[in-house]
Amino acid sequence: MTPDGIVFTDGDSYAHIWRIWMSASQDFPLSGRNPFANFPRGGEIPWPPLFDWGVASAVQVLSLDQQSTELLGAWVPVLLGSAGIAIASLIASRCFSNSAGWVTGVTLAVLPGSFAYTQFGYLDHHAAMTLIGTSMLGGAMMVVSSEDAGPRWWPEFASAICGVALLTWAGALLHIAILQCALVCWAFGAASRQIAKRRTLRLARAHVTTALLILPFSLYRWEIYGDFNPLVLSQFQPTWYVAVSACLALSVLAWSYLTLGSTILKRWLSALLVGGIGFVLALSFVPELRNILEGSAGWFTGGHQFLANITEIAPLLGTGDTFDWSRAKTHLSFLFFLVPLAMVLVGKSPRRPDRWLLILWSIAFGSMTLNQFRFINTYSVAHAIVLGGAMSMLIDWIASNLKRLMFQRVAVVSAYIVYGACIALPAVTFYQDVIRNDQRWHHDFRLHGIVRAADWLRTVQPAPLDAQGMPTASVMCAWGPGHRVRYHSGWPVNQDGFGPYVSPQNVEVAESYFSAVDENDAIKSLRGVGARYVIADKSGAGDPPYATRTMTNRLVSMNGSGHLIRVQGENKNVWLPALTRHRLVYQTPTFGEGVWVYERVRGAVIRGMASPGAMVAVELEVQTPTAGLLQWKSRVRADARGKFRARVPYATDNVGSPKGTRSIPVFATGPYSLRSGDQLAHVRVQEESVQRGGEIESPALDAPKAH
């Protein structure tokens, strides 16, 4: 929290709070295309709507205003994380001992890896997935602990939680796939064929029920992803569940009428045969399946260049040839490197399938976290449970091997002190940095400037809407702050933090615009995207750096004015023309990290006469609220008949008033000055002429004729 209110920790949180508030206050639909993303085509939001819908429903029930909604949204991840810690503690208590539960709970409460996605202000569906994934793990551990076929109604409970998981995040299929493997092993590994059949049929029932639960939400026709893609909630998930259920049912059928179910090995061989035939048939009847799976694997292999810009996709231990263990040490403590030994200690107990499942879960998500940091929230839970179980077993060993009570107490206290120090010492440094970063908000000129600029735009020029409430114009900005801009300004954006996964065409348009070296080319690149305002900073479209001549540098470093620049490699200066169809309307403090807001205008045309071939210099003094007086300069050359035409972007009818006619804090202090040789003229320009491209006659600048 800051004096300006709630500041969420990352851009995606603003995507969620925007959807939540729009749904709660305006009954904005959360499924289908979002007309405020990827304008004007609208954006297909890749995550399912359950998380945002749940928070929006709470907002409606509590009748919260926008400020209170932000406060609730900031607390949601904390509440979800706390519930996840409580469930993890119960899992450890049930699987090991009460002391293991306490150690697990305290570890997760302190561990930065657990904090990362459930901290105050991190409003993201991954916070919900921490709780959901922990519940899935605990439920599966309870099922595999059963000697018979498990509790009678466990398939229905499993279906419900799997449905909630997939309606929260399509990537939950990773969690489910791990548990599917474990439950298949549990079902096939039963002591007798009859128990194996009952277990397998219940597992098949769980799959069918889950498919029926998610089917109504899986029928959306995705333009970008297609109808059969695991990256989004599509027909892939219910088809997957039905296919697995069919394979399980066919396996049971084979066991009933043949001798294939008499031993564990035969049951496995028959199931693999059925599954293999099913997979071959799937590749035959769904020819695009191979490409879809390869494309989905790009999230792990870095198959898209855009992923290199996302920090949560980075490996835990560094990239390339650079090994960096500091991130693992900080987020998972020094004990991260001893977890394999803890797994061996925990898993050596005979006939404890629940502990084996815990180890499988830990290895799977530990491997995924090594590949991509974003899985650390799920892995940290298993990490803490394994460490809690190992500590519990260590305490039991001390109690059974040290006979004197005093020695036992000293050893136990010493063990807890060492464990606590290993967990707490790296965390202290991490939380010190977190506190400093929170205090540094007002000194983060870029993010603070973007929010101020977007708030100003909402106040001065609300987004234009048609009769159906759909937006008719947009804001062009870098993809990184796109979610913030949309939430604070109320305007649609052409690209945002989802990049090519929501706005593939507009990502290319934005890059073409910000990297263009000619204003006319930049304007042409924006045709059809409806961008009326441009919010610019040194990041351009989001892939800096940009060369001196590009639109990015001209918008940010030159304030849209013409400038003399040094030609690289040559000992001369050249004139870089002014921007004549972009006018600065708002500017935040610079210090190298400022933000500039430009309005796209047609520009008024000043026409007149000068000496044939003469250069005409056009200048205007502009007052800004933060950078003082700026000089906007342009140059045009008269033709062979002495005619010249100079396009200008600023009106002068608000001279001397920062409020003017449209409350623009950037305003002209006087008329345009036109100079050619020793001739000088002043021209005033009306706002209507700037907006409509009107023409204004200038006093003559050619030398007076001799009589």
Image (cartoon, grey):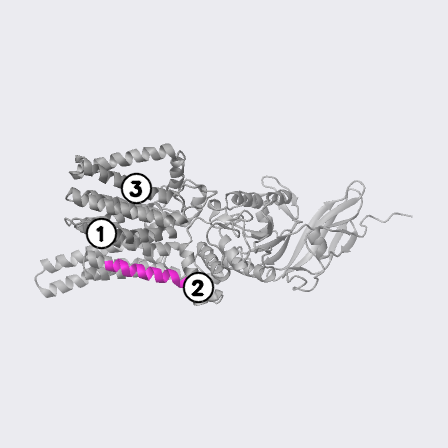
503 or 397: nearer the eye?
Answer: 503
User: Predominant secondary structure in magenta?
Assistant: helix
Q: What residue span does the magenta drawing correspond to?
A: 71-90
For the residue marked with disc 1, what is the amino acid?
Val
Q: Residue furthest left?
A: 403
The mark that comes first in sequence, 2 or 3, is 2
Q: Is residue 87 magenta?
A: yes
587 or 567: nearer the eye?
Answer: 587
Which one is in front in this view, the residue at disc 3 or the one at disc 1? 3
User: Image height check: is 451 above or below 250?
Assistant: below
Q: Is residue 228 magenta?
A: no
The residue carrying mark 2 is: 59
370 or 68: nearer the eye?
Answer: 68
Residue 373 visible in the shown view? no
Quick one: SS at disc 3? helix
x and y percentages locating residue 3 in the rendered image: 48, 67
For the residue marked with disc 2, what is the amino acid?
Val
User: Image height check: is 237 above or below 280?
Assistant: below
The residue carrying mark 3 is: 244
Q: Quadrant of the N terminus?
A: bottom left
x and y percentages locating residue 472 in the rendered image: 59, 52
**In the rendering, which numbered label is found on residue 143?**
1
For the residue marked with disc 3, what is the amino acid?
Val
